[in-house]
Amino acid sequence: MPKRRRSEPMPDVFETFAHRVDEGDESAAPIDAAQMAKGAGLSLGLMILAALGFVLGFWTGTQNEPDLAYDHLVWEGIIKVGFAALCGVLAAALVLALATLAIGVPWVQRQRQSDRRR
């Protein structure tokens, strides 16, 4: 059964939700460009560390393949690539978690010290 097209015009989303838009909110704090650049740098650094962790984990997974008897060459390839990819993902997650802890713990300590001073 063919679909029918609407004959009425589509509603304007911006007009429908205009009451939810905060135009000129003066109470919001201004965006600090230095803080934004620092956060972007940390994000980029974490992405690079995760990528390096994945590559090293994938390489380690290709060096330490499980000894199994395969019935077909395709299954052997799938299992070897899958095992190496799994090692890469686990290594990337581990590196990312450790880097996040290394960044987050000192930040939390600084926040607690600044709260005590107030």
Image (cartoon, rainbow, N blue to C red):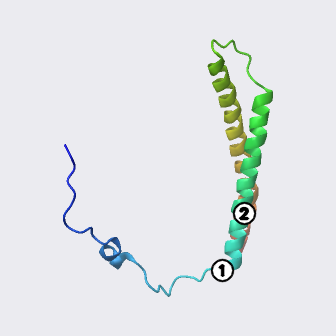
Q: Residues within 10 Å of mark 1 (few under 14, many from 20)?
A: few
Q: Which mark is residue 32?
A: 1
Type of amino acid under label 2: Leu
Residue 35 visible in the shown view = yes
Q: Which mark is residue 42?
A: 2
Type of amino acid under label 1: Asp
Q: Are marks 2 and 1 in contact (CB under 8 Å)?
A: no
Task: Tell me which label, 2 or 1, sits earlier in the chain.
Answer: 1
Residue at the extreme front of the image, as rendered: 2
Element type at mark 1 = loop
Judging depth in this view, the residue of 31 and 85 nearest the camera is 85
Residue visible at 78% across and 26% down in the picture: 64
Across and down, in percent, residue 35 comes to 69, 75
Image: 72 above or below 44: above
Side (left or right) of 18 relative to 94: left
Snapshot quadrant of residue 38: bottom right
Residue visible at 69% across and 26% down in the picture: 80
Q: Residues within 10 Å of mark 2 (few under 14, many from 20)?
A: some
Which quadrant, please, contains the C terminus? bottom right
Snapshot quadrant of residue 20: bottom left
Across and down, in percent, residue 67 comes to 74, 16
